[in-house]
Amino acid sequence: MENYRLTEPRYEAMNYRRCGRSGLLLPEISLGFWHNFGAGVDPDKCRAIVEAAFDAGITYFDLANNYGPPYGSAETTFGRIYAQSLRAHRDEILVATKAGHDMWPGPYGEWGSRKNLIASLDRSLERMQLDYVDIFYSHRPDPYTPLEETMQALVDIVRSGRALYVGISKYPPEMAERAYAYLREAHVPCLVYQGRYNMLERGHEEEILPQAAAEGVGYVAFSPLAQGLLTDRYLNGIPDDSRMRHSQFLKESVLTPELLAQLRAWNEAAREEGLTLAQYALRWILRRPEVTSVIVGASSVEQLKNNLKAVSAR
Ligand SMILES: NC(=O)c1ccc[n+]([C@@H]2O[C@H](COP(=O)([O-])OP(=O)(O)OC[C@H]3O[C@@H](n4cnc5c(N)ncnc54)[C@H](OP(=O)(O)O)[C@@H]3O)[C@@H](O)[C@H]2O)c1
């Protein structure tokens, strides 16, 4: 197996931001594995994207138990790339995974029980060939399980050495408040809130962002490009190789004439600043001091490199 030779110097091209009131710095741009790393994707392409990311100073890789398809396969892909390219650099990278969405059949395969979180993380570690993850998230709020059970599972996961830090994702403000308080009292403070925030979805500006900042919790924005809408991808039709053609998560019906007109106007504004629409959209998020990092998806090295210029263009 060919060893990966890293390009130096790597860290100069990236800016790093402190994650809340913690000791951890995150790169302004991180790489997500929700799409583009499943079982059907060319392994060499996956590896090239991850290596290009690390070479550019991206140190945070964001996964979840059920990323694929099929579920688990993005973690398996990451594990293979880790073994080939990154194992010698384990202390230079942050790997995150999550549990909470549906993963395996039966009553323990989803939500926020202690059973689900601990069993899921153990399987994730196996797939990723890791001894521990850097960040473990409760992937979504659970209306049925007592919040205390979910939070205590996170605390015990950290105490057991399976994770260094914990985070929450998509929690409404009142549940986030209780989660932050519980974790702080247990001396495992919540490191980070992960939420959907982009030029088309600004709901978190009102409560979630100020709350995280006040609590000393970092904030990472997922789907910062609205799954590709905030790029040049759909400005002139729907490409055959696009997420909109292939994924149930981005429906063609969202691309209304009104949205297209808005995207074209933003594209023009971006061009006037010498930016692509994707760079413009990422910089728009990073203007907020509460935001620690944006987690981008990329289906090619070219897309990733384009997005990385949102940082270096400053
Ligand atoms: N916590 C949660 O519940 C949650 C939910 C969703 C996502 N996430 C995390 O956030 C990560 C990012 O989410 P996302 O994939 O939706 O992010 P995104 O960055 O909004 O969208 C990524 C997609 O946009 C297109 N794209 C990216 N850069 C481009 C460029 N420069 N030019 C043209 N098109 C470009 C690609 O689409 P094509 O594939 O069409 O090329 C790519 O797959 C996920 O991988 C995951 O780690 C978390």
Image: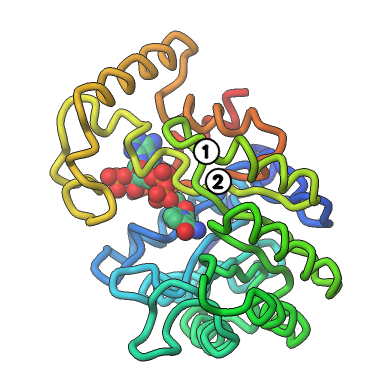
Q: Horizontal and vertical percent for residue 44?
A: 34, 63
Quick one: 95 or 260, which is closer to the camera? Answer: 260
Category of crowding for the residue at label 1, using alpha-carbon neighbours closer than 10 angstroms: few (below 14), some (14–19), many (at least 20): few
Q: Horizontal and vertical percent for residue 123?
A: 49, 87
Amino acid residing under circle 1: Gly
Q: CA distance from mark 1 to mark 2?
A: 12 Å
Q: Horizontal and vertical percent for residue 236?
A: 18, 25
Q: Which mark is residue 79?
A: none
* Residue underneath mark 1: 203
Residue occupying image coordinates x 67% and y 69%: 134
Sequence order check, earlier mark of 1 and 2: 1
Q: Which mark is residue 221?
A: 2
Select label 1 or label 2 by which is in front.
1
Quick one: 32 or 85, which is closer to the camera? Answer: 32
Cβ(mark 2) to ligand 1 < 8 Å? Answer: no
Is residue 10 rendered to the left or right of residue 109? right
Q: Horizontal and vertical percent for residue 21?
A: 83, 52
Quadrant including the C terminus: top right
Category of crowding for the residue at label 2, using alpha-carbon neighbours closer than 10 angstroms: few (below 14), some (14–19), many (at least 20): many
Amino acid residing under circle 2: Ala
Which element is circle 1 on? helix
